Amino acid sequence: MKEISLNELGFNPWEKIGKEWFLLTSGNERDGFNTMTASWGFMGVMWRRNTFTTVVRPTRYTYEFMEKNDLFTVSFFDEKYRSVLNFCGANSGRSCDKVKETGLTPLFTDGTTAFEEASLILVCRKIYAQDMDVSLLADDIKPVNGSDPIHKQYIGEILKAYSK
């Protein structure tokens, strides 16, 4: 992996985030980490900072790591890793070792965790977090989480980007 400027990123975010998906990871080598597949998020500028925003349900194991750590990573993969993303989205780190089950190689970098197999990694520092409020949704929007609690939103300042 080599560090790149965010100005070098050239992709369609709807495709990259919504269709290709990503692994959201928080934690570190010393205290442990967890990862989960996500397909909801957005990139932009907030408070004059380049940011990545994602959401996590409180029932997800990764939520615990997002809450106790200031850093998180967003790792994008080539299509050949689709089965890994499927596995990490369908299984909890509470009940299995996702790294062992998928063969992913943790990359401990910048005080947090990503994966060597990723084609693009964003290292983010949590700068804002808030529980989403279902009562504020537009009338035609229905939460997609069934009986689970609504998501918490995390805005992270993108500190570094790495690419293969």
Image (cartoon, helix red, strand yellow):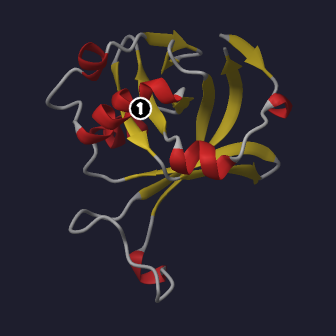
User: Most extreme residue toward the left, as rendered?
Assistant: 95
Query: Residue at horizontal 24%, vertical 62%?
Result: 148
Viewer-nearest residue: 39 or 125: 39
Q: Left of 87 or right of it: where is 36?
A: right
Residue 115 x, y percent position in the rendering? 48, 17
Q: Is residue 155 visible?
A: no
Q: Quadrant of residue 28?
A: top left
Image quadrant containing the C terminus = top right
Q: Residues within 10 Å of mark 1 (few under 14, many from 20)?
A: some
Q: Relative to 38, is 80 above or below?
A: above
User: Most extreme residue toward the right, as rendered?
Assistant: 7
Query: Residue at horizontal 22%, vertical 20%?
Result: 97
Secondary structure of residue under mark 1: helix
Residue 83 x, y percent position in the rendering? 34, 30
Q: Left of 59 or right of it: where is 108?
A: right
Q: Relative to 156, is 146 above or below?
A: below
Image quadrant containing the N terminus = top right
User: Most extreme residue toward the bottom, as rendered?
Assistant: 139
Residue 125 x, y percent position in the rendering? 60, 34
Viewer-nearest residue: 129 or 136: 136
Q: Relative to 89, is 160 above or below?
A: above
Viewer-nearest residue: 55 or 133: 55
Q: Left of 5 or right of it: where is 36?
A: left
Q: Which residue is mark 1?
A: 82
Count of residue discs: 1
Q: Which amino acid, mark 1?
A: Arg
Residue 10 x, y percent position in the rendering? 79, 36
Query: Residue at horizontal 49%, vertical 41%?
Result: 21
Viewer-nearest residue: 154 or 142: 142
Q: Relative to 19, is 65 above or below?
A: above
Q: Quadrant of residue 101?
A: top left
User: Most extreme residue toward the front, as rendered?
Assistant: 80
